[in-house]
Image (cartoon, rainbow, N blue to C red):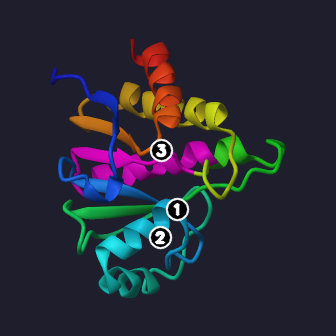
Amino acid sequence: MGRATQVTTMKQDIVKADFVDAVVNAANRTLLGGGCVDGAIHKAAGCSLFWACLKLHGCAVGSAKITKAYGLPCKYIIHTVGPRWHGGKKGEAEALYHCYYNSLILAHEYGIRTIAFPSISTGIFSYPLEQAADVAVTAVYNYVKQNPEHFDRIIWVFLEEEIEQAYQRKIRELFG
């Protein structure tokens, strides 16, 4: 049996994540750039990312698609579209869960061993932080439990301490 996947957090700008094979972009449905993490990733990666994403013809909520990383210091960008928060009664938790789980499936298909996630949907999509951390870490926990040797390291990367602390609490609860 191989070694266990390391699941952690880090306070850093995700566009500078040179310690992973892939970063996950919290994208909008068009995949053509937007605000928050999406805008920062598109700006740092350069216009080649725009053209690559244009060829993908968008992405459904909860799904994931992949491109090269272009100007980023990693190899790939996995684009996933999180749900907008509508009070939690319109399938938001299931959709957010699939963002993480489907990103990990796609990453494994491409031989990615290390991956960095942002906090999907907690920015302009207004998903409550504690609930988002619960869904996100649970999705990763379930994937790792079923596929313990697929990844070396899964890391959430944040700029804000409050967000990092919410994810750390849930990681400690599930991963020990």
Residue type at tag 3: Tyr
Residue type at tag 2: Gly
Q: Which residues are magenta?
A: 96-120
Q: Would you say 33 lies left or right of 116 here?
A: right
Tell me the distance, in whole angstroms, between the alpha carbons under discs 3 and 2: 23 Å
**Residue 94: x percent and y percent?**
66, 43
Please tell me in which quadrant of the rendered image residue 52 appears. Answer: bottom left
Quadrant in the picture for the N terminus: top left
* Label 1: which secondary element: helix
Which residue in the structure is indicated by mark 1?
36
Classed neighbour count for the residue bearing mark 1: other residues with Cα under 10 Å, few (<14), some (14–19), many (≥20): few
User: In this rendering, which labeled residue sits more in front, label 3 or label 2?
Assistant: 2
Classed neighbour count for the residue bearing mark 2: other residues with Cα under 10 Å, few (<14), some (14–19), many (≥20): some
Which residue in the structure is indicated by mark 2?
39
Classed neighbour count for the residue bearing mark 3: other residues with Cα under 10 Å, few (<14), some (14–19), many (≥20): many
User: In this rendering, which labeled residue sits more in front, label 3 or label 1?
Assistant: 1
* Label 3: which secondary element: helix
Mark 3 or 1, nearer chain start: 1
Please tell me in which quadrant of the rendered image residue 35 appears. Answer: bottom right
Which residue in the structure is indicated by mark 3?
101
- Was residue 104 drawn as part of the magenta stretch in this picture? yes
Tell me the distance, in whole angstroms, between the alpha carbons under discs 2 and 1: 6 Å
Marks 3/2 in contact by CB < 8 Å: the verdict is no
Residue 117, compared with residue 56, is above or below; it is above
